[in-house]
Image (cartoon, helix red, strand yellow):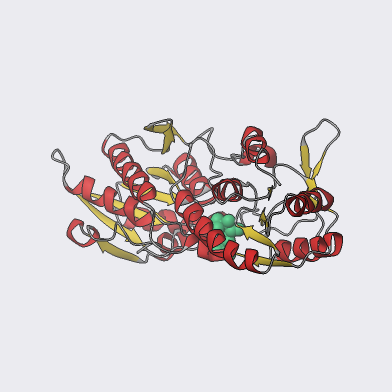
Amino acid sequence: MKKVGILTGGGDAPGLNAVIRAVVIRLAVEKHEEYHCIGFIDGWAGLRDNKTVKLEAGKVDSILHEGGTILGTSRTNLYKKPEDVKKAVQNYHQLELDALVAIGGDDTLEIAYYLNRDEGLKAVGVPKTIDNDVMGTDFTFGFWSAVEQATQAIDDLRVTTTSHRRVMVIECMGRHAGWITAYTGLASGADFIAVPERPVHINDIAREVRHCRELGKAHAIVVVAEGASIGGIEPKPRVTKDANGGWKLSDKIERDSFGNVVLKPGEIAEAVATEIEKLTGMETRGIALGHLQRGGAPSAYDRILGTRYGLQAADAVIHGHFGHMVVLQGLRVETVPMKGMIRENQSEAKRYKYLPDSFLDMAEVFYG
Ligand code: F6P
Protein backbone atom coordinates (compact mmCIF):
# COMPACT_ATOMS: atom_id res chain seq x y z
CA MET A 1 0.00 0.00 0.00
CA LYS A 2 1.40 3.42 -0.98
CA LYS A 3 0.55 6.65 0.77
CA VAL A 4 0.15 10.03 -0.96
CA GLY A 5 -0.22 13.41 0.76
CA ILE A 6 -2.11 16.28 -0.87
CA LEU A 7 -2.05 19.95 0.14
CA THR A 8 -3.40 23.26 -1.15
CA GLY A 9 -1.37 26.42 -0.49
CA GLY A 10 -1.65 30.18 -1.10
CA GLY A 11 -4.82 32.08 -1.94
CA ASP A 12 -7.73 29.75 -2.68
CA ALA A 13 -9.04 29.41 -6.23
CA PRO A 14 -12.18 27.78 -7.61
CA GLY A 15 -11.22 24.33 -8.93
CA LEU A 16 -8.98 23.23 -6.05
CA ASN A 17 -11.53 20.62 -5.01
CA ALA A 18 -11.71 19.32 -8.58
CA VAL A 19 -7.96 18.61 -8.44
CA ILE A 20 -8.15 16.91 -5.02
CA ARG A 21 -11.07 14.75 -6.22
CA ALA A 22 -9.32 13.71 -9.43
CA VAL A 23 -6.04 12.79 -7.68
CA VAL A 24 -7.81 10.70 -5.02
CA ILE A 25 -10.15 8.92 -7.43
CA ARG A 26 -7.46 8.25 -10.05
CA LEU A 27 -5.17 6.71 -7.42
CA ALA A 28 -8.04 4.70 -5.94
CA VAL A 29 -8.72 2.99 -9.28
CA GLU A 30 -5.06 2.27 -10.04
CA LYS A 31 -4.79 -1.45 -10.74
CA HIS A 32 -1.07 -2.18 -10.27
CA GLU A 33 -0.66 -0.74 -6.81
CA GLU A 34 -2.91 0.11 -3.90
CA TYR A 35 -2.81 3.80 -2.92
CA HIS A 36 -4.36 5.72 -0.13
CA CYS A 37 -4.46 9.51 0.21
CA ILE A 38 -4.30 11.90 3.11
CA GLY A 39 -4.77 15.67 3.03
CA PHE A 40 -2.70 18.23 4.93
CA ILE A 41 -4.72 20.94 6.64
CA ASP A 42 -3.94 24.56 5.65
CA GLY A 43 -1.15 24.01 3.16
CA TRP A 44 2.48 23.70 4.22
CA ALA A 45 1.44 24.46 7.83
CA GLY A 46 -0.31 21.07 7.84
CA LEU A 47 2.85 19.21 6.84
CA ARG A 48 4.93 21.16 9.38
CA ASP A 49 2.42 20.58 12.21
CA ASN A 50 1.38 17.09 11.13
CA LYS A 51 -2.30 17.99 10.75
CA THR A 52 -3.90 15.52 8.41
CA VAL A 53 -7.26 14.23 7.28
CA LYS A 54 -8.17 11.02 5.44
CA LEU A 55 -9.19 11.44 1.81
CA GLU A 56 -11.42 8.68 0.49
CA ALA A 57 -12.72 8.35 -3.06
CA GLY A 58 -16.36 7.95 -1.91
CA LYS A 59 -16.20 11.13 0.18
CA VAL A 60 -14.45 13.41 -2.32
CA ASP A 61 -16.65 12.41 -5.23
CA SER A 62 -19.20 15.13 -4.47
CA ILE A 63 -16.88 18.16 -4.08
CA LEU A 64 -16.34 18.93 -7.77
CA HIS A 65 -18.78 21.85 -7.88
CA GLU A 66 -17.64 23.44 -4.59
CA GLY A 67 -15.43 26.55 -4.56
CA GLY A 68 -12.56 27.02 -2.08
CA THR A 69 -10.67 24.01 -0.77
CA ILE A 70 -11.89 21.28 1.57
CA LEU A 71 -8.34 21.09 3.00
CA GLY A 72 -8.00 24.74 3.95
CA THR A 73 -5.04 26.82 2.88
CA SER A 74 -2.48 29.31 4.19
CA ARG A 75 0.44 31.37 2.96
CA THR A 76 3.07 29.48 4.97
CA ASN A 77 6.66 29.87 3.83
CA LEU A 78 8.53 26.93 5.41
CA TYR A 79 11.81 28.42 4.24
CA LYS A 80 11.49 31.44 6.54
CA LYS A 81 12.58 29.19 9.43
CA PRO A 82 15.05 26.28 9.00
CA GLU A 83 13.29 24.41 11.84
CA ASP A 84 10.01 24.47 9.87
CA VAL A 85 11.66 22.73 6.92
CA LYS A 86 13.11 20.15 9.35
CA LYS A 87 9.71 19.49 10.92
CA ALA A 88 8.04 19.15 7.53
CA VAL A 89 10.67 16.66 6.32
CA GLN A 90 10.44 14.68 9.58
CA ASN A 91 6.65 14.45 9.31
CA TYR A 92 6.86 13.37 5.67
CA HIS A 93 9.08 10.44 6.73
CA GLN A 94 7.18 9.61 9.91
CA LEU A 95 3.95 9.40 7.95
CA GLU A 96 5.78 7.10 5.49
CA LEU A 97 4.64 9.09 2.51
CA ASP A 98 5.47 7.82 -0.95
CA ALA A 99 4.56 11.08 -2.68
CA LEU A 100 3.27 14.58 -2.09
CA VAL A 101 0.99 16.53 -4.43
CA ALA A 102 1.30 20.28 -3.81
CA ILE A 103 -1.42 22.39 -5.42
CA GLY A 104 -0.69 26.10 -5.45
CA GLY A 105 0.74 29.18 -7.10
CA ASP A 106 4.39 30.03 -7.59
CA ASP A 107 5.03 30.31 -3.82
CA THR A 108 3.68 26.82 -3.05
CA LEU A 109 5.35 25.29 -6.10
CA GLU A 110 8.68 26.85 -5.19
CA ILE A 111 8.60 25.15 -1.78
CA ALA A 112 7.67 21.82 -3.40
CA TYR A 113 10.60 22.25 -5.79
CA TYR A 114 13.14 22.93 -2.99
CA LEU A 115 11.81 20.06 -0.85
CA ASN A 116 12.27 17.73 -3.79
CA ARG A 117 15.65 19.08 -4.89
CA ASP A 118 17.27 19.49 -1.46
CA GLU A 119 15.42 17.04 0.82
CA GLY A 120 14.48 14.33 -1.65
CA LEU A 121 10.74 14.54 -0.97
CA LYS A 122 8.77 13.04 -3.83
CA ALA A 123 6.78 16.10 -4.80
CA VAL A 124 4.53 16.77 -7.80
CA GLY A 125 3.20 20.30 -8.42
CA VAL A 126 -0.16 21.49 -9.74
CA PRO A 127 -0.37 25.18 -10.76
CA LYS A 128 -3.22 27.24 -9.32
CA THR A 129 -4.08 30.91 -9.04
CA ILE A 130 -6.87 33.18 -10.16
CA ASP A 131 -4.10 35.56 -11.29
CA ASN A 132 -2.95 33.20 -14.11
CA ASP A 133 0.64 34.37 -13.69
CA VAL A 134 2.41 31.02 -13.13
CA MET A 135 5.17 30.32 -15.65
CA GLY A 136 4.99 27.37 -18.00
CA THR A 137 1.24 26.86 -18.20
CA ASP A 138 -1.22 28.55 -20.54
CA PHE A 139 -3.89 28.73 -17.84
CA THR A 140 -4.09 28.08 -14.15
CA PHE A 141 -7.47 26.88 -12.89
CA GLY A 142 -9.41 29.51 -10.97
CA PHE A 143 -8.64 32.20 -13.54
CA TRP A 144 -11.72 31.71 -15.71
CA SER A 145 -14.02 31.51 -12.67
CA ALA A 146 -12.60 34.82 -11.43
CA VAL A 147 -13.12 36.38 -14.87
CA GLU A 148 -16.74 35.14 -14.87
CA GLN A 149 -17.36 36.62 -11.41
CA ALA A 150 -15.78 39.95 -12.27
CA THR A 151 -17.55 40.19 -15.64
CA GLN A 152 -20.90 39.51 -13.99
CA ALA A 153 -20.15 42.20 -11.40
CA ILE A 154 -19.29 44.77 -14.09
CA ASP A 155 -22.45 43.92 -16.06
CA ASP A 156 -24.40 44.65 -12.87
CA LEU A 157 -22.45 47.86 -12.17
CA ARG A 158 -23.01 49.11 -15.70
CA VAL A 159 -26.75 49.44 -14.91
CA THR A 160 -26.31 51.88 -12.04
CA THR A 161 -23.39 53.64 -13.76
CA THR A 162 -25.55 54.38 -16.81
CA SER A 163 -28.55 55.54 -14.77
CA HIS A 164 -26.38 58.13 -13.02
CA ARG A 165 -24.31 59.00 -16.12
CA ARG A 166 -21.22 58.29 -14.06
CA VAL A 167 -17.74 56.96 -14.49
CA MET A 168 -17.09 53.69 -12.63
CA VAL A 169 -13.56 52.61 -11.74
CA ILE A 170 -13.46 48.88 -10.99
CA GLU A 171 -10.43 47.27 -9.36
CA CYS A 172 -9.64 43.63 -10.11
CA MET A 173 -7.08 41.37 -8.41
CA GLY A 174 -3.63 40.97 -9.93
CA ARG A 175 -0.60 42.25 -8.07
CA HIS A 176 2.01 41.39 -10.62
CA ALA A 177 0.10 40.64 -13.79
CA GLY A 178 -3.06 42.02 -15.38
CA TRP A 179 -4.69 38.85 -16.71
CA ILE A 180 -7.97 39.11 -14.77
CA THR A 181 -8.25 42.84 -15.44
CA ALA A 182 -7.61 42.58 -19.16
CA TYR A 183 -9.83 39.56 -19.80
CA THR A 184 -12.63 40.99 -17.65
CA GLY A 185 -12.21 44.38 -19.29
CA LEU A 186 -12.52 42.91 -22.76
CA ALA A 187 -15.47 40.68 -21.75
CA SER A 188 -17.36 43.59 -20.21
CA GLY A 189 -16.66 46.17 -22.93
CA ALA A 190 -14.50 48.42 -20.73
CA ASP A 191 -13.55 51.89 -21.94
CA PHE A 192 -10.08 51.71 -20.39
CA ILE A 193 -7.95 48.89 -18.96
CA ALA A 194 -4.92 49.56 -16.73
CA VAL A 195 -2.54 46.74 -15.78
CA PRO A 196 0.93 46.43 -14.20
CA GLU A 197 2.54 45.44 -17.51
CA ARG A 198 1.75 48.67 -19.35
CA PRO A 199 2.42 51.87 -17.38
CA VAL A 200 -0.04 54.68 -18.16
CA HIS A 201 -0.70 58.19 -16.85
CA ILE A 202 -3.97 59.31 -15.26
CA ASN A 203 -4.28 61.85 -18.13
CA ASP A 204 -4.54 58.91 -20.58
CA ILE A 205 -7.50 57.55 -18.64
CA ALA A 206 -9.15 60.98 -18.34
CA ARG A 207 -8.82 61.48 -22.10
CA GLU A 208 -10.61 58.19 -22.83
CA VAL A 209 -13.32 58.99 -20.31
CA ARG A 210 -13.98 62.39 -21.94
CA HIS A 211 -14.03 60.67 -25.31
CA CYS A 212 -16.83 58.39 -24.07
CA ARG A 213 -18.92 61.48 -23.28
CA GLU A 214 -18.13 63.01 -26.68
CA LEU A 215 -19.40 59.85 -28.31
CA GLY A 216 -22.64 60.24 -26.38
CA LYS A 217 -22.10 57.29 -24.05
CA ALA A 218 -23.99 57.61 -20.78
CA HIS A 219 -21.24 55.90 -18.81
CA ALA A 220 -17.54 55.12 -18.81
CA ILE A 221 -16.16 51.88 -17.40
CA VAL A 222 -12.52 51.86 -16.30
CA VAL A 223 -11.03 48.55 -15.12
CA VAL A 224 -7.76 48.70 -13.18
CA ALA A 225 -5.63 45.93 -11.73
CA GLU A 226 -4.78 46.29 -8.06
CA GLY A 227 -1.12 46.41 -9.12
CA ALA A 228 -1.68 48.71 -12.14
CA SER A 229 1.02 51.23 -12.89
CA ILE A 230 -0.67 54.64 -13.14
CA GLY A 231 1.33 57.84 -13.05
CA GLY A 232 -0.09 61.09 -11.67
CA ILE A 233 -1.94 59.57 -8.69
CA GLU A 234 -1.12 58.63 -5.12
CA PRO A 235 0.00 55.90 -4.34
CA LYS A 236 2.87 56.32 -6.75
CA PRO A 237 3.19 53.60 -9.40
CA ARG A 238 5.49 50.76 -8.41
CA VAL A 239 6.36 50.11 -12.03
CA THR A 240 8.02 52.72 -14.26
CA LYS A 241 9.29 52.60 -17.80
CA ASP A 242 13.04 52.38 -18.21
CA ALA A 243 15.19 53.98 -20.91
CA ASN A 244 15.08 50.86 -23.15
CA GLY A 245 11.30 50.70 -23.28
CA GLY A 246 11.19 47.93 -20.63
CA TRP A 247 9.98 48.46 -17.09
CA LYS A 248 11.44 48.43 -13.61
CA LEU A 249 10.08 48.19 -10.11
CA SER A 250 10.51 50.81 -7.43
CA ASP A 251 12.40 49.41 -4.42
CA LYS A 252 10.08 50.98 -1.83
CA ILE A 253 7.47 48.25 -2.04
CA GLU A 254 6.02 46.40 0.93
CA ARG A 255 6.35 42.64 0.48
CA ASP A 256 5.08 39.52 2.27
CA SER A 257 7.19 36.54 3.41
CA PHE A 258 7.29 35.22 -0.17
CA GLY A 259 8.36 38.58 -1.62
CA ASN A 260 4.90 39.27 -3.05
CA VAL A 261 3.87 42.90 -3.25
CA VAL A 262 1.37 43.81 -0.47
CA LEU A 263 -1.44 46.10 -1.67
CA LYS A 264 -4.42 47.67 0.11
CA PRO A 265 -7.68 46.55 -1.53
CA GLY A 266 -9.55 49.50 -3.04
CA GLU A 267 -6.67 51.93 -2.77
CA ILE A 268 -6.01 52.27 -6.48
CA ALA A 269 -9.71 52.33 -7.46
CA GLU A 270 -10.32 55.15 -5.02
CA ALA A 271 -7.24 57.10 -6.11
CA VAL A 272 -8.11 56.81 -9.81
CA ALA A 273 -11.78 57.72 -9.20
CA THR A 274 -10.87 60.84 -7.22
CA GLU A 275 -8.43 62.03 -9.85
CA ILE A 276 -10.75 61.30 -12.80
CA GLU A 277 -13.52 63.33 -11.18
CA LYS A 278 -11.09 66.23 -10.69
CA LEU A 279 -9.76 66.08 -14.25
CA THR A 280 -13.05 65.55 -16.12
CA GLY A 281 -15.65 67.07 -13.82
CA MET A 282 -17.66 63.87 -14.28
CA GLU A 283 -19.14 62.15 -11.23
CA THR A 284 -16.99 59.06 -10.56
CA ARG A 285 -17.13 56.12 -8.17
CA GLY A 286 -14.49 53.52 -7.35
CA ILE A 287 -15.07 49.92 -6.25
CA ALA A 288 -12.79 46.95 -5.55
CA LEU A 289 -14.20 43.52 -6.43
CA GLY A 290 -11.68 42.03 -3.99
CA HIS A 291 -12.12 38.50 -2.70
CA LEU A 292 -15.47 38.08 -4.47
CA GLN A 293 -13.30 37.14 -7.44
CA ARG A 294 -12.08 34.05 -5.56
CA GLY A 295 -15.56 33.15 -4.33
CA GLY A 296 -18.42 31.08 -5.67
CA ALA A 297 -18.48 27.81 -7.56
CA PRO A 298 -15.82 26.95 -10.14
CA SER A 299 -16.82 27.53 -13.78
CA ALA A 300 -17.23 24.44 -15.98
CA TYR A 301 -13.86 25.26 -17.57
CA ASP A 302 -12.09 25.25 -14.19
CA ARG A 303 -13.80 22.04 -13.09
CA ILE A 304 -12.52 20.38 -16.25
CA LEU A 305 -9.03 21.91 -16.10
CA GLY A 306 -8.74 21.02 -12.38
CA THR A 307 -9.86 17.47 -13.17
CA ARG A 308 -7.33 17.14 -16.01
CA TYR A 309 -4.53 18.50 -13.82
CA GLY A 310 -5.50 16.13 -10.98
CA LEU A 311 -5.52 13.07 -13.27
CA GLN A 312 -2.15 14.04 -14.75
CA ALA A 313 -0.66 14.65 -11.29
CA ALA A 314 -1.84 11.22 -10.12
CA ASP A 315 -0.23 9.69 -13.21
CA ALA A 316 3.00 11.56 -12.41
CA VAL A 317 2.92 9.94 -8.95
CA ILE A 318 2.27 6.47 -10.40
CA HIS A 319 5.10 6.83 -12.93
CA GLY A 320 7.51 8.42 -10.45
CA HIS A 321 7.82 11.82 -12.16
CA PHE A 322 8.81 13.68 -9.01
CA GLY A 323 10.17 17.21 -9.07
CA HIS A 324 7.72 17.73 -11.94
CA MET A 325 4.57 19.77 -12.32
CA VAL A 326 1.58 19.47 -14.62
CA VAL A 327 0.86 22.25 -17.11
CA LEU A 328 -1.55 23.14 -19.91
CA GLN A 329 0.22 23.69 -23.20
CA GLY A 330 -2.20 24.41 -25.99
CA LEU A 331 -4.83 21.68 -25.81
CA ARG A 332 -2.63 19.19 -23.96
CA VAL A 333 -1.93 18.71 -20.27
CA GLU A 334 1.74 17.75 -19.90
CA THR A 335 4.14 16.87 -17.08
CA VAL A 336 7.29 19.02 -17.08
CA PRO A 337 10.25 19.44 -14.68
CA MET A 338 9.63 22.15 -12.08
CA LYS A 339 13.16 23.39 -12.63
CA GLY A 340 12.89 26.13 -15.18
CA MET A 341 9.26 26.86 -14.32
CA ILE A 342 10.04 27.98 -10.81
CA ARG A 343 11.13 31.54 -10.15
CA GLU A 344 14.27 30.37 -8.28
CA ASN A 345 16.74 33.28 -8.26
CA GLN A 346 14.84 34.98 -11.06
CA SER A 347 14.55 38.73 -11.42
CA GLU A 348 11.04 40.16 -10.98
CA ALA A 349 10.66 40.58 -14.72
CA LYS A 350 11.14 36.82 -15.23
CA ARG A 351 9.29 35.50 -12.20
CA TYR A 352 5.78 35.74 -13.49
CA LYS A 353 3.90 35.02 -16.67
CA TYR A 354 2.85 38.44 -17.91
CA LEU A 355 0.02 39.48 -20.16
CA PRO A 356 1.21 39.82 -23.76
CA ASP A 357 1.23 43.33 -25.22
CA SER A 358 -0.87 42.14 -28.15
CA PHE A 359 -3.81 41.49 -25.85
CA LEU A 360 -3.84 45.11 -24.67
CA ASP A 361 -3.50 46.37 -28.24
CA MET A 362 -6.60 44.38 -29.11
CA ALA A 363 -8.56 45.78 -26.14
CA GLU A 364 -7.60 49.34 -27.13
CA VAL A 365 -9.50 49.01 -30.40
CA PHE A 366 -12.68 49.28 -28.33
CA TYR A 367 -11.74 52.25 -26.13
CA GLY A 368 -13.99 55.32 -26.11
O1 F6P B 1 -2.84 35.07 -5.06
C1 F6P B 1 -3.98 35.52 -5.62
C2 F6P B 1 -4.53 36.76 -4.96
O2 F6P B 1 -5.91 36.62 -5.12
C3 F6P B 1 -4.01 38.07 -5.52
O3 F6P B 1 -4.56 38.47 -6.72
C4 F6P B 1 -4.33 39.01 -4.40
O4 F6P B 1 -3.54 40.16 -4.43
C5 F6P B 1 -4.03 38.18 -3.20
O5 F6P B 1 -4.25 36.84 -3.57
C6 F6P B 1 -4.84 38.51 -1.98
O6 F6P B 1 -4.37 37.72 -0.95
P1 F6P B 1 -5.06 37.53 0.45
O7 F6P B 1 -6.21 36.59 0.28
O8 F6P B 1 -3.98 36.97 1.29
O9 F6P B 1 -5.54 38.89 0.88
Residue at 39% from the left image edge and 49% from the top image edge: 302
| Residue 319 location, quadrant | top left
Residue 285, quarter of the rendered image: bottom right
Expressed as whole percent of the image width and height from the top left, the position of residue 77 reads 55, 57
Task: From the top left corner, tell me how far across and down residue 9 is, in percent.
Answer: 46, 57
- Single out the residue that lies furthest toward the front: 216
Residue 344: quarter of image: top right
Q: Quadrant of ligand 1?
A: bottom right
91, 100: nearer the viewer:
100
- Residue 79 at least partly seen: yes
205 displayed left or right of 32: right
Q: Residue at x 38, y 46 (%)?
A: 301
Position in image of residue 90 (x %, y %): 40, 56
Q: Position of residue 200 (x, y in %)?
A: 78, 46
Numbered disc total: 0
- 342 sits to left or right of 319: right
Give the residue displayed 73% in from the left and 42% down from the top: 198
Quick check: 299 above or below 54? above
160 w.r.t. 328: above or below: below
Image check: 145 left or right of 231? left
Q: Inspect this view and state whether residue 82 appears.
A: no
Is residue 248 toward the left or the right of residue 7 in the image? right
Q: Residue furthest left?
A: 31
Q: Nearer the viewer, residue 184 or 82?
A: 184
Q: Residue at 28% across / 60% down in the picture?
A: 63
